[in-house]
Image (spheres, rainbow, N blue to C red):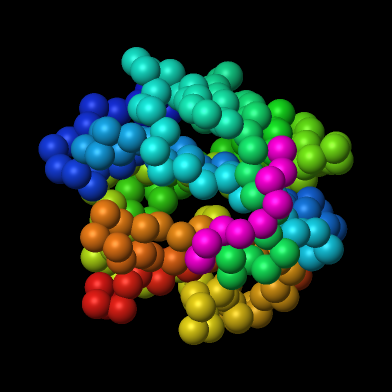
């Protein structure tokens, strides 16, 4: 059973790849827009990783990726650096979180650019969103930690555009050893078993099934994960439609030598 105290930060263990990660995703019921935020605290590297994205079938991917964010202080989950401020607040353990973001990202017409030079137009990205538990269904997350389904509401700012969000999503909290480059491929969709995905040569998901149900792919919001030795893993997050609703599916493709 997940303890309410687990919502806070955990004591790091030795090793470079120990990471504590807080993930938040959302999707509109009609699939017109979706997004996510992920804060990964990596004390062994002395930095935090920050990812945020907003995308939809008829809009470019707006991506924030910064792997050199100063570690949050104390037990806070507030981070800031040049062009980025974000805070992640547990209002009620296992029930209610708020996420605020003010950042500059890059707008990518082709999501494959996220795996390359991230060449695109500078774009302001802001979020003022709330994740509230949808049911008493906190469950173990693959690889450790826990996850839960949520309703999500609030505002997202993309450039001069203001989007009202009233949808669904997932919240994840994981801690432990995570080597993004030496493991095997893995696939995840919030709370689901029997998840599978196929990627193309670039690492983008081209087909996915969850519990035997095929997904209709709506949009991609991938991120590259470079290492100091020049190798990189590729994580695609695909916004997908199922009979049961709209949700995210993610697939990690490590470097070829990593299996």
Residue extending farthest to the left is: 14
**123 within the magenta span:** yes
Identify the image quadrant of residue 123.
Answer: top right
Expressed as whole percent of the image width and height from the top left, the position of residue 151 reads 70, 40
Q: Residue at x 72, y 75 (%)?
A: 216
Q: Residue at x 13, y 38 (%)?
A: 14
Is 150 positioned to the left or the right of 204 in the image? right
Is 80 positioned to the left or the right of 109 in the image? left
Q: Quadrant of the C terminus?
A: bottom left
Q: Which residue is drawn at 21% across and 38% down?
A: 44
Identify the image quadrant of residue 244.
Answer: bottom right
User: Total marks drawn?
Assistant: 0
Q: In which quarter of the image is the N terminus?
A: top left
Expressed as whole percent of the image width and height from the top left, the position of residue 98 reads 62, 26
Camera-nearest residue between 76 and 193: 76
Residue 71 can be seen, yes or no:
yes
Q: Provide the residue span drawn in magenta.
A: 115-124
Q: In this view, does 157 lie above or below 234?
A: above
Residue 211 can be seen, yes or no:
no
Is 237 positioned to the left or the right of 159 in the image? left
Camera-nearest residue between 159 and 136: 159
Expressed as whole percent of the image width and height from the top left, the position of residue 209 reads 58, 77
Q: In this view, does 75 lie above or below 125?
A: above
**225 within the magenta span:** no
Expressed as whole percent of the image width and height from the top left, the position of residue 171 reads 55, 42
Q: Which residue is drawn at 41% across and 51% down?
A: 141
Q: In this view, does 163 lie above or below 27?
A: above
């Amino acid at each position: 059973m997940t303890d309410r105290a687990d919502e806070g930060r955990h004591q790091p263990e030795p090793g470079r790849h120990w990471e504590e990660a807080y993930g938040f995703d959302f999707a509109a019921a009609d699939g017109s827009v979706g997004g996510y935020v992920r804060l990964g605290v990596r004390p062994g590297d002395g930095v935090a990783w920050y990812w945020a994205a907003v995308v939809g079938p008829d809009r470019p991917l707006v991506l924030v990726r910064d792997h050199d964010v100063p570690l949050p202080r104390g037990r806070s989950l507030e981070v800031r650096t040049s062009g980025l401020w974000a805070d992640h607040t547990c209002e009620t353990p296992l029930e209610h979180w708020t996420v605020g973001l003010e950042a500059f990202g890059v707008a990518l017409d082709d999501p494959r650019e996220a795996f390359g030079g991230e060449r695109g137009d500078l774009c302001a990205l802001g979020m003022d969103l709330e994740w509230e538990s949808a049911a008493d269904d906190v469950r173990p997350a693959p690889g450790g930690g826990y996850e839960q389904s949520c309703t999500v509401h609030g505002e997202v700012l993309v450039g001069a555009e203001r989007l009202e969000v009233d949808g669904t999503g997932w919240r994840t909290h994981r801690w432990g050893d995570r080597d993004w480059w030496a493991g095997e491929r893995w696939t995840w969709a919030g709370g689901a078993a029997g998840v599978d995905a196929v990627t193309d040569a670039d690492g983008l998901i081209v087909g996915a099934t969850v519990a035997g149900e095929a997904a209709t792919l709506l949009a991609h919001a991938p991120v590259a994960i470079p290492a100091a030795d020049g190798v990189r893993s590729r994580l695609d997050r695909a916004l997908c439609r199922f009979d049961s609703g709209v949700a995210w599916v993610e697939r990690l493709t490590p470097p070829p030598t990593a299996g």
